[in-house]
Image (spheres, grey):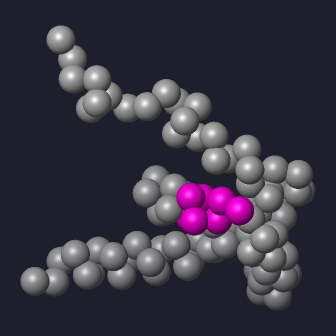
C-alpha cells in the first residue's frame, strides 16, 4: 500500500495561489515583451509590470515558482528575465562552493 503522506497534494492545492495574483485582471501584454522591444520602452513596460507585482499578495509564491521552473520569459514575481537568471546563477555558484 502506498504511503499516503508521500503523495503530492491535489493539483488545486498546489496552484490555487494563482487565483489571488494581482496580474489576473491586468493586461498580460504588460508582462511579456513584444519581439524586438528594446531599451527604454522595454524598461518602462517591465517597471509597470513590476508595480503590479509589488501589490500582489502571492508575490513570493509566484517568484519561487518562476525560479523553480526556470521561467524563460516575462516578469514573474516582480523579477525580469535577467533578474531571474542572475538569481539562478548566484544560487548555482553558492551551491557549488564548499
Q: Position of residue 48 (x, y in %)?
A: 84, 76
Q: Is residue 14 visible?
A: yes
Closer to the camera in the image, 4 or 45: 4
In the displayed structure image, the side of residue 67 where residue 34 appears, left or right: right
Q: Which of the image's four quarters has the C terminus?
A: bottom left
Residue 29 lies in the magenta-colored region:
no
Q: Position of residue 56 (x, y in %)?
A: 74, 65
How many numbered discs?
Answer: 0
Going by the picture, which residue comes out furthest to the bottom? 40
Q: Quadrant of residue 68?
A: bottom left
In the displayed structure image, the side of residue 46 where residue 96 appears, left or right: left
Closer to the camera in the image, 86 or 62: 62
Residue found 22% across the figure and 75% down from its top: 95
- Above or below, 31 against 25 in this view is below
Q: Position of residue 20 (x, y in %)?
A: 74, 50
Residue found 52% across the figure and 39% down from its top: 14
- Above or below, 1 against 95 in this view is above
- Above or below, 5 against 40 in this view is above
Q: Which of the image's four quarters has the N terminus?
A: top left
Going by the picture, which residue comes out furthest to the left? 98
- Above or below, 65 against 88 in this view is above
Q: Position of residue 59 (x, y in %)?
A: 64, 65
Magenta segment main secondary structure: helix
Q: Is residue 49 visible?
A: no
In the displayed structure image, the side of residue 81 where residue 33 appears, left or right: right
Residue found 84% across the figure and 64% down from its top: 30
Q: Which residues are magenta?
A: 57-63
Amino acid at each position: 500500500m502506498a504511503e499516503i503522506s508521500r503523495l503530492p497534494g491535489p493539483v488545486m492545492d498546489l496552484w490555487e495561489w494563482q487565483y489571488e495574483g494581482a496580474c489576473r485582471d491586468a493586461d498580460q501584454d504588460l508582462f511579456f515583451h513584444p519581439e524586438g522591444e528594446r531599451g527604454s520602452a522595454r524598461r518602462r513596460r517591465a517597471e509597470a509590470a513590476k508595480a503590479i507585482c509589488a501589490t500582489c499578495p502571492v508575490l513570493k509564491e509566484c517568484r519561487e515558482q518562476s525560479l523553480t521552473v526556470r521561467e524563460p520569459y516575462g516578469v514573474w514575481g516582480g523579477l525580469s528575465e535577467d533578474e531571474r537568471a542572475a538569481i539562478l546563477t548566484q544560487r548555482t555558484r553558492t551551491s557549488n562552493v564548499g
